[in-house]
Image (cartoon, rainbow, N blue to C red):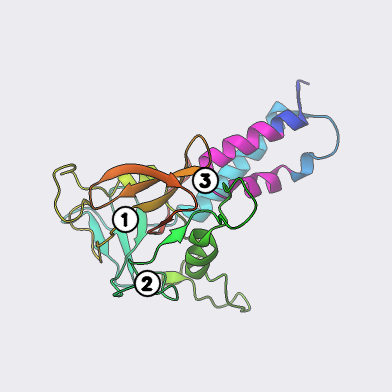
Amino acid sequence: MLGVARSKVKQFALGALAAALGAGSYVIAAVVFSDFQSGTTISASEMNAKLNALKDAVNAATASVVCPPSSPARFTDNGDGTVCDSLTGLMWEKKETCGGLNFSNPHCIENAYQWTDDTLTPPFTAPDGTLYTSFLRKLNDLESSHSGLTSACFAGHCDWRIPSIGELRSIVGASVPNCTGTCIAAGFPGSLAETTSTWSSSSRESLLEAYSLEFPTGLLTWDLKGTSLHARAVRGGPMR
């Protein structure tokens, strides 16, 4: 049987899954491949079976968004602080204006977060900044202790994440670059008063920077991960 060196399989798989799943995917991939630690080879079919099992698990966890038909409007305000996009099947966090920084309320549009914690040991590339340790932590109810039978996750969902740059661009208005005020797509509800860029989960090639989207202008940008930028969470969207 054709075998594949375990170390090379794991290295390839971790990188491929990281690219597909975004920040934090190395942890998921490492768990999936934990049973390949002993011995020297695995079969190609076994590797494919593991990858397919992971893909199915991710899809089952994230493909649970069902939006109303797009007529008459693309975006639906669900009345619980979320917005459903019938075009992409994504559910977005609806932001609100708080009049200033208020980190106890993750929905405040004025809040800004770091992608990575630049007070720790270099090279400052890991998803360990307040974007993940504060913003997503609050939305996914990772700060309170409970039995698991009840949850304070935002809008009853515990799978909120940072959107990829492609997902952020999907809610940019068609009038870019000639939009005024904000370049978010027409009809998107909630506060749209971002004053700086909004983080994506997508790293640049150097890994020291990540892509962001400047909603006041609609332009794609990138910043060092230690920079403080706005955040808007999303859920749904199957892994492809």
- Marks 2 and 3: which is nearer the front? 2
Q: What segment is highlighted magenta in the picture? A: 10-33
Mark 1 residue element: loop
Residue drawn 31% across the image and 45% down it: 169
Q: Quadrant of residue 55?
A: top right
Q: Earlier in the sequence, mark 3 or mark 1?
A: 3
Residue indicated by mark 3: 22
Residue indicated by mark 2: 101
Q: Is residue 48 visible?
A: no
Give percent across and percent down for residue 116: 53, 54
Magenta-drawn stretch, dominant element (helix, strand or loop): helix
| 156 lies above or below 235 | below
Q: Earlier in the sequence, mark 1 or mark 2?
A: 2
The amino acid at mark 3 is Gly
Q: Is residue 168 visible?
A: yes
Disc 1/disc 2 C-alpha distance (Å): 14 Å
- Does the magenta run of residues contain 11? yes
Give percent across and percent down for residue 114: 48, 57
Q: Decide: marks 2, 3 in contact (CB < 8 A)?
A: no
Please state if 229 lies on the left or on the right of 174 as rendered. Answer: right
Is the N terminus in the top left, top right, bottom left or bottom right quadrant? top right
Give percent across and percent down for residue 102: 39, 74
Mark 3 residue element: loop
Residue drawn 42% across the image and 49% down it: 200
- Does the magenta run of residues contain 224? no
* Residue 196's disc number: 1
Give percent across and percent down for residue 118: 56, 54
Disc 2/disc 3 C-alpha distance (Å): 27 Å
The amino acid at mark 2 is Leu
The residue nearer to you, when weighing 185 against 192, is 192
